């Protein structure tokens, strides 16, 4: 039996092809197995279309930035503002000077002020007496030299009463009767009524002058 020279060649090529195919299939199987061993990554889609309203909490903004501060107001009774205007009533039977002085009861004390919105002690007495035609210097020492001296037991309404608060004549008020006087006391109290028998004023009393007859 004779064989063709080409048959062995074809047979060999066939074997080689079969071997290559087997290796390729083996690689595919390994690759597929390796891929299956890898952890899977799941991508989830998110639906952004929603009718729900998400409320974001507001920041705690200080109300000061919204200009809602309410300032506190203090009302002070300052009496009348001048001659003939209504103010705190003077005691019954008071002289014209005393009645007028009462119109400024409660006005503030400011050093050097001479009225009508604020006073110091000598500014108060000079302002009151000016309304009755009596000119008094805006200085306690000068007022102590005006008019005539009056003893403490002979005081009448409208007399000026003096005190040596700082060792010399340094404070003045207007006597209103019943042992009391009205004066611009200090920045804490303003124009008030005090008693001559109070410890401080009793110990610093310096005398009185009558400037209006």
Image (cartoon, rainbow, N blue to C red):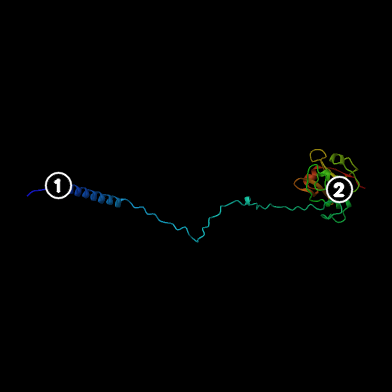
Q: Nearer the viewer, mark 2 or mark 1?
A: 1
Residue 23 screen position, x and y as percent = 22, 48
Pointer 2 with pointer 1, Cβ within 8 A: no
Which residue occupies 85% across, 39% down?
Answer: 141
Residue 197 shown left or right of residue 68 in the figure? right
Residue 135 — which label? none
Look at the picture and state if 32 lies above or below 136. below
Q: Position of residue 211 (x, y in %)?
A: 90, 45
- Disc number at residue 6? 1
Please say if 170 is above or below 83: above
Q: Answer with the quarter of the image where residue 208 lies.
A: top right
Image coords of residue 22 (percent x, y) = 21, 50
Q: Is residue 131 left or right of residue 200?
A: right
Q: How many marks?
A: 2
Q: Residue furthest bottom?
A: 51
**Is there any visible trace of residue 126 in the rendered image?**
yes
- Pick the residue in front: 154 or 122: 122
| Secondary structure found at label 2 | helix
Asked if one can make out residue 172 in the rendered structure from this viewpoint, the answer is: no
- Residues 209 and 79: in front is 79
What residue is rendered at 30% in x and 51% in y?
35
Q: Which residue is mark 2?
A: 128
Distance of mark 2 from mark 1, alpha carbons?
151 Å
Task: Indicate the position of residue 87 as horizontal and vertical percent values.
Answer: 82, 54
Decide which of tag 2 and tag 1 comes sooner along the chain.
1
């Amino acid at each position: 039996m004779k064989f063709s020279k080409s048959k062995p060649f074809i047979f060999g090529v066939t074997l080689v092809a079969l071997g290559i195919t087997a290796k390729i299939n083996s690689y595919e199987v390994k690759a597929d197995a390796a891929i299956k061993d890898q952890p899977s990554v799941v991508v989830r889609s998110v639906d952004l279309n929603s009718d729900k309203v998400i409320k974001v909490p507001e920041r705690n903004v200080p109300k000061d930035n919204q200009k809602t501060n309410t300032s506190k107001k203090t009302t002070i009774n300052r009496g009348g503002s001048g001659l003939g205007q209504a103010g705190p009533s003077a005691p019954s039977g008071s002289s014209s000077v005393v009645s007028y002085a009462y119109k400024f009861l409660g006005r503030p004390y400011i050093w050097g002020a001479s009225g009508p919105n604020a006073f110091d002690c000598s500014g108060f007495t000079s302002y009151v007496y000016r309304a009755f035609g009596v000119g008094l210097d805006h200085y306690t020492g000068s007022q102590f030299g005006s008019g005539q001296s009056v003893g403490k037991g002979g005081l009448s309404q409208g007399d000026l009463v003096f005190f040596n608060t700082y060792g010399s004549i340094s404070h003045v008020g207007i006597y209103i009767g019943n042992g009391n006087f009205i004066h611009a006391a200090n920045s804490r109290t303003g124009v008030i009524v005090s008693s001559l028998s109070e410890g401080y004023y009793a110990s610093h009393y310096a005398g009185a002058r009558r400037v209006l007859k």
